[in-house]
Image: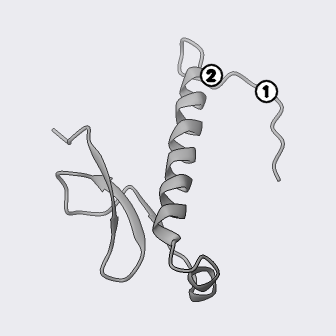
Amino acid sequence: MSSPFLEIVELANGKVALRRSDEEGEPLLVIEFSDDAREYLQGNYIEVAKVMISAGMQMAGQMMDDEDEDGELIPEDRVLH
């Protein structure tokens, strides 16, 4: 059974990944910052990745709350920016 615990790690290739703490396989999510973005963020890209992952998990939780009894999303207007 997979671990319920997740961890954020920096991979050897410099990408930031979200994975289950007990697995070495493919990450659940990978974030890659360009060299320009890393320079702009003055090396704080790990902190930015943590916030991005947190926001994504909060949104996923909200979407799960918006499901009806059959697991279907309740329709609503969505604004894409």
Is 78 located above or below residue 72 in the figure? Answer: below
Instruction: Residue 6: give x, y in percent of width and height.
Output: 30, 47
* Alpha-carbon span between mark 1 and mark 2: 10 Å
Q: Quadrant of residue 37?
A: bottom right
Of helix, strand and loop, which one carries label 2? loop
Quarter of the image with the N terminus in it: top left
Query: Would you say 79 lies left or right of 3 here?
Result: right
Q: Nearer the viewer, residue 79 or 69?
A: 79
Label of residue 60 in the image: none
Instruction: Residue 9: give x, y in percent of width and height.
Output: 32, 64
Q: Are marks 1 and 2 in contact (CB under 8 Å)?
A: yes
Residue to which mark 2 is pinned:
66
Is 57 located above or below residue 34 in the figure? Answer: above
Query: Would you say 57 lies left or right of 6 here?
Result: right
Q: Amino acid at mark 2?
A: Asp
Instruction: Residue 26: give x, y in percent of width and height.
Output: 30, 63
Q: Quadrant of residue 18?
A: bottom left
Of helix, strand and loop, which one carries label 1? loop
Q: Amino acid at mark 1?
A: Glu
Residue to which mark 1 is pinned:
76
Q: Quadrant of residue 24?
A: bottom left
Is 64 located above or below residue 58 in the figure? Answer: above
Residue at coordinates 51% horizontally, 72% vertically from top-left? 44
